Amino acid sequence: MKPTVHMGAMRIGIIGLGLVGRALAARLLAAGVPVGGFDVSGPAVEAATAIGVTPAADLSELLGCSSIALICVFDDVQLTAVVAEVAAADRASRPLELVINTATCSPAAVEAAAASLAAAAIAFLELPLSGSSAEICAGEALGLLGADATTLARYRAVVNLLSPRHVHVGIPGSAARAKLASNLILGLNRAALAEGVILAERLGLDGHRFLELLRQSPAYSRAVDTVGERMVTRDFTPRSRLAQHRKDLALILAQATGLDVGLPLAEAHAALLDRAIEAGLGEADNAALIAAWATRSGGPNRTK
């Protein structure tokens, strides 16, 4: 078996420099790991460059100088396109040995990515992260790890740096399944909190004091701490994006349909997210779900 890789020998290229990509870049840079990056969004590249990421002109250039590619894209389509380019690259001209996917994707897309990369003699592991970009940057998010035992043993140091808190779920595809199931519960916790805060405020209760009550109540969930304050203050500065969770929920509902499983609460949540997106809040934080609640007359509840 190959020896364990140490981070000092690595150069990591991040594909997708949005909130998650930049949060992971910040962790790597703080540890002294050189980081390159590529994104089709100019503002995302500028924001990443400002924290020390070396931008690449295109994906080919990034792959040509990276030993590890960290994929932080939006969906199945983007994951598939990136993996196709990685697998097709001239092996003699690239140092790439490992691809890590952090995107929340369908199990089928992750399994196909793993197979394509295995055929190109490139190691693969999946590491979708449960938590906001702020939690990812602080090392507090939970990584769901899908990898075979050999790959995990060789790249354990990389995983530990990217996500100190992680659970090895199984082989590639397993983490995607776990992420979708856990995201279903996470999103419903936020939705229940938003509905409860709206009712408490309409009943005349102070929102901040209501959150303190919840922390001592059987109704408590971690959503109270992660988004509660921002729901009460209507601070929707993105740490994660509402439209991103709607994409995840579409994956969840598609999986349920294929398994003939009814998810009525998830369907209601999807309708609320659609209402928020229609109100122009798709790029806002998930705390903006509170603004999707309509009054009985039908208007979106943007403010208290």
Image (cartoon, grey):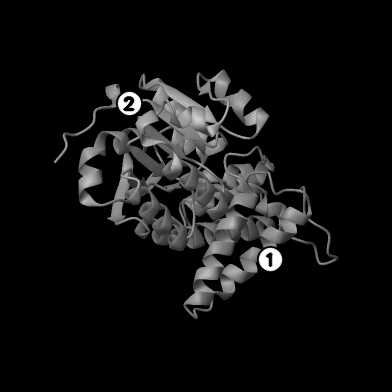
- Mark 1–mark 2 Cα distance, whole angstroms, equals 44 Å
Residue 184: percent from the left, percent from the top? 50, 62
Question: Could you tell me if the residues under marks 1 and 2 are in contact, i.e. CB atoms within 8 Å?
Answer: no
Q: Does 3 sit above or below residue 286? A: above
Residue 10 disc label: 2
- 213 on left or right of 100: right
Quadrant location of the N terminus in the rendered image? top left
Which three-letter amino acid code belongs to the residue tagged 1?
A: Ala
Q: Does 248 sit above or below residue 96? A: below
Whether residue 291 appears in this view of the structure is: yes
Whether residue 131 appears in this view of the structure is: no
Q: In the image, what residue occupies the spot 26% across and 38% down?
A: 155
- Location of mark 1 (residue): 271
Relative depth, front residue between 166 and 68: 68
Which three-letter amino acid code belongs to the residue tagged 2?
A: Met
Element at label 1: helix
- 219 on left or right of 126: right
Residue 203: percent from the left, percent from the top? 71, 59
Of mark 1 and mark 2, the one earlier in the sequence is 2
Q: In the image, what residue occupies the spot 50% across and 70% down?
A: 255
Relative depth, front residue between 162 and 119: 119
- 104 on left or right of 153: right
Relative depth, front residue between 215 and 19: 19
Task: For marks 1 and 2, give the one nearer the viewer.
Answer: 2
Within-10-Å neighbours for mark 1: few <14, some 14–19, many 20+: some
The quarter of the displayed image where residue 154 is located: top left
